[in-house]
Amino acid sequence: MSRIVLHIDRLVLRGIEPDDATAFAEALRAELQRQLTAHGAQTLQRHDGLARLRPAPVHIAPRSSSEQLGKAVASHLLPTTERGAP
């Protein structure tokens, strides 16, 4: 069994209220875990051994929930073939 360790050193969240940060963080963690469990090697192959990833900004619809934002950020960080990644 392989082990994947993912460290996020810095995540800048503009427009997130401090009270929503916990819900966002939980949604992000859960979606990253789901994607890595379901598509681990396939998802990471796209990055071809990069030690650091600097994704483009994520833009979402106004009034999205913290949970929706967490899922959107996770999907942007680790796109899988189910979301149209190469």
Image: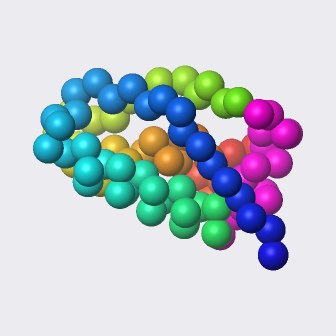
Seen from this angle, which residue lies furthest bottom? 1
Q: Which residues are magenta?
A: 38-51
Q: Considering only vertical position in the picture, is 29 above or below 17?
A: below
Percent x, y of residue 28:
42, 52
Is residue 68 visible in the rendered image? The answer is no
Residue at (17, 37) in percent of width and height: 18
Please state if 61 lies on the left or on the right of 44 as rendered: left
Seen from this angle, which residue lies furthest right? 48
Residue at (35, 57) in percent of width and height: 26
Q: Considering only vertical position in the picture, is 38 above or below 42?
A: below
Q: Considering only vertical position in the picture, is 24 above or below 51?
A: below
Please state if 80 lies on the left or on the right of 65 as rendered: right
Residue at (67, 54) in percent of width and height: 5
Please state if 49 lies on the left or on the right of 21 as rendered: right
Percent x, y of residue 42:
78, 57
Residue 8 counted in the magenta span: no
Please state if 79 lies on the left or on the right of 68 as rendered: right
